[in-house]
Structure formats: structure tokens, C-alpha cells
Image: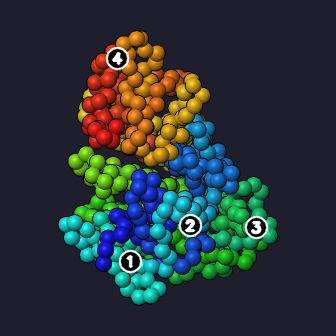
Amino acid sequence: MTMNQQVVIAGAGPVGLWLAAELRLAGITVTVLEPRLERDPNSKALTVHPRTIELLASRGLEQPFLEEGLHIPSGHFAVLDSRLDFGLLETDFPFTLALLQSRTEELFEIQARAAGADIRRGHRVTGLTETPDSVTVHIEGPDGPYDEEALYVAGCDGTRSTVRTSAQIPYPGDDFTVLGFLGDVVLDEPPPGVAFSRTGIDGLLMIVALPGGLHRIVGTVPSDVRTDWPGDLTLEELRANVRQVTGTDFGLHSPTWLSRYSNTSRQAESYVKGRVVLAGDAAHQHMPAGGVGLNVGVQDATNLGWKLAATIQGRAPAGLLDTYHDERHPVGADLLEHTAAQTALLSAFTPDGQRLRSLLSKLVAEQPSLSRTLGERLSGLHVAYDAPTADAHPLTGRRAPNLAFTDGGDTVFALLRTGRYVLLDLFGPRDDQGTPLATAQDGPLVTHTGTLTREHVPWAYVSAALIRPDGHVAWATEEDDPEKLAAVTREALDRAGLTGADR
């Protein structure tokens, strides 16, 4: 057995495929193993949030999503009557996209295969054997069992992750107390508009139009507040639930998918253990409230990809891979918290519970700042990582917006498409003694010298900034002395491991 790939990824869902493409962008050899022979036609996720669209734009993949996805300029928190106005968000993409998960997976797979990832369907991971220098992945394939040796294995294989279990990573949490129902059906008399919702003491549901003449119905009713599993959802139960909440069944028939979901809540204790890393549902499980799950998983993979690549290639500062856990585990904990809070509101069927929902809905309508804060949290735009030092610039750890420059050339998102660090030289016109901060365009560093087209308040006095491959600010300064600016920039590049031949 020889090591012919550096990373094995278990799971060819959105998270595994996106991670594969990220690793290939950095030149890492990747094999993706997926038990299913065909892509699952039943799309659990429909929503692509603004921060995920920003990541797509940072890799040049946004256009098919923008063209095919339905643009929805608002979001919801616990299906309150007052929706969240995404127009208040500071992003180039102030909307969500409604797109079937199966199509998202297809687009991600096209990207990963084009980048050179080896994707094997019908291959199931059965276990792992780890040594100090490598990890052997045990696999059941169409022709029988075999092994693959790699430097790392990534568990992107869902809530029942074989990788996580084999690595003996604890996955503590809470069992379900609330169920939800889902049906993709034909409606002879659908409600008007693309999306419809109804809430009240008798239950809650949402109806969303899907391609192919289908509608998705999701919701929960008082009898779903339970701790026992009632069996598979039937068409008759779905019809009764819809009638109970709305007084009609909209002429529903011909289901293509009936399912239940729950508020089971769990999180892996460690996202990195030895030569095993976890992302997406393998790392966190939660109630699918607000359509955030796929998005957080893709954002996990974007944080992980460049760090794992740098570690394998020997150009990472000490402990870089561990910062994947340090940065993303709190995001996962926050995800579990706000989906649990939404679950409490979704299942608040008592009169007092309905009054609470009414009050919160009024506050969202009356307080744009609350709408914006909840929108940032749902969309992923709020995520900011801890700065390494107390005196770091306030931008450190925050996501960089899509800054544009007066020369009419590249934007920050366009500069990030190579998957490398981006050094922005925003010092402005220089005198005869001034020199640019850097000129290299090879290795893991891209530099851009320019002036911003408009004033972004937090960036107004920034003279230089280093943007990580995942779009978060690694370092920024407002130093206005050319010699000192060059010196502090070199120090920042040294800390990031972007020195010597890499520059």
C-alpha cells in the first residue's frame, strides 16, 4: 500500500466537496469517498445565505448560484410574522438564494472534479488506523474491502460520522424534545407567492415553491412536542397537520419525499484530533431552523482547507491547524444556541407562548437594529475570530468586505480566487522615497496596491491589511510612516509564515 493522496475526505455532500475543492486549490491531492452511488435527489437544504455567497464569489463560483437560485431579500427567525430585512446587511449579496441542495452538490462536484479531486462513489469508510505519521482509512468498495493511507482524514460524513466514531471523538448533546414534518408534494391549490407561512396555537408551517411543480411543506404541531419517535411520516398525517394549521390541505398529493426532523443537539468535543479533522454535520447537529446548517458547514470547510494545506506543505506557523477548532467550535456552539432558541419559539403553542412570539415580532418590525443583528447572525456575516493580541487592529479576525479600488481593477473577492493570502497596500500616493510593501505574486501571497473607491468606515484609515484565504483579516495597520509601515508589514508576514521563498 502506498500513500497516493494527502487527504481522504469521507462524504461527498456539500461540505466534503467544498473542502476537496479548497484543498485542490492549494495543490493538495484529495480522495473523496461516498457510499451513495447517486446524488440524493431529496434536498434537505434549500437556503444559501449571504456569507456563503461571498465565499462562492471569493472562488469565482457565484454566477450559477445567482442565476439559478431564487433571490429572497429577507430571512426569518423562528418563522415570526415580521421577517428580517436583509437589505440592512452590509454585503454585496443582501438576500438568500433558494436552491435545491442536490444542485448545490452538483455545482460543487463539478468544481472539485475540475480541480483534480478523485471522487469515488459506492465507497464506504468502515474505520481508521492512525499512526504518528499517517492515517490508514479502511474502506468497503464495489470490489470489496481495501485501505488508503493518507496524511489526514476529514470527516464530512454527517451526524452519524464513522470518522468521528472511529477517532473516538465524543459527541455530547441533548436528545430531541420537538419534531418537525417535511413533505415535497404537488399542490392543486397552492397559496399565492413563492413562500407562505402560518403560525398559531394549532401549529406552524411554511410552504415554499420548488422546481418541477412541487412545493415543500415544513412545520410542527403541538403533538410534535414529544420525546418518542412516532414512526415514518405518512401522507395522511401530513394532510391532517396542514389542515389543522391552515384549515385547508391545498389539494396536496403525489409526494416525492416525506420525512421527519428533530431538535437533537450535539457537538463534537474536538474538531481536530491527531490526523483526524471534522466539519459540517459530523461536527455539529441541530434543529434545521433558519436554513443555516449547510452554510455553517461550508464555512467550516473554508476555514479548514487553507490551514490543512499549509500544515501538509510545511509552511504553517506552529499550531495553525489547531486554530481551526479554536475558531469554528465557538461558531458551532453559537449555532446550537440560536437554533435551540428558535425551537423554543417555534414550539410555543400555549397562549403565553403566542404572546411572546407576537412581542418579538413587533420588536423586529420596530427595531431595525434587532432585525439587522438577527440577520447577521443567521447569514454568517457576524462571525469574527479572536485577535491574537489585545493591541491588534479592531478589524483583525473580521471578514473583509468586497472592497473595490479606484483603478477599476480587481476587488478583494476577485483577489481571493487563487485561495492565497492577499496583502492590500492602501497607503496611497508615495513620495520619491516611498516603496510598495511587496511586489511578489507567487507562492501563497498576492499583493494589490490601490485606493478604495468609497469610504468603508472601519477601513477609512487603514494603510495595509493582510487578508487570509478564507476572507478574514489576519492583520491591519493605520501606520502612516513609509519605513515603519514596511517594517510592521514584514513582521505580519513573518507571523503568518509568508516569508523567504514564499514571498
The label number, if any, that marks residue 32 in the structure image:
none
Residue 177: horizontal and vertical position, in percent? 43, 68
Mark 1 vs mark 2: give the one in front: 1
**Distance between mark 1 and mark 4 Cα atoms:** 55 Å
The label number, if any, that marks residue 125 in the structure image:
1
Q: What colour scheme has been applied to the protein in the rendered image?
A: rainbow
Please tell me whether mark 2 sits on a helix, a strand or a loop.
loop
**Which amino acid type is shown beneath numbered disc 2?**
Lys
| Viewer-proximal residue among 378 and 323 | 323
**Which amino acid type is shown beneath numbered disc 1?**
Val
Query: In terms of sequence position, does the residue under pointer 1 or pointer 4 come before the other?
Result: 1
| Viewer-proximal residue among 297 and 308 | 308
Label 1 crowd bin: few (<14), some (14–19), many (20+), radius 10 Å:
many
Label 3 crowd bin: few (<14), some (14–19), many (20+), radius 10 Å:
few
**Label 2 close to label 3 by CB (< 8 Å):** no
Query: In terms of sequence position, does the residue under pointer 3 or pointer 4 come before the other?
Result: 3
Residue depicted at x 60% and y 72%: 42
Residue depicted at x 66% and y 79%: 235
Residue 271: horizontal and vertical position, in percent? 31, 60
User: Which residue position holds label 2?
Assistant: 44
Query: In terms of sequence position, does the residue under pointer 2 or pointer 3 come before the other?
Result: 2
Residue 331: horizontal and vertical position, in percent? 38, 51
Query: In terms of sequence position, does the residue under pointer 3 or pointer 1 come before the other?
Result: 1
**Label 4 close to label 2 by CB (< 8 Å):** no
The label number, if any, that marks residue 213 in the structure image:
3
Q: Is residue 500 left or right of residue 419?
A: left
The residue most toward the right is 188
Q: Is residue 168 visible?
A: no
**Which amino acid type is shown beneath numbered disc 3?**
Gly
User: Which residue position holds label 4?
Assistant: 482
- Name above or below for residue 96 compared with residue 10: above
Count of numbered circles in the view:
4
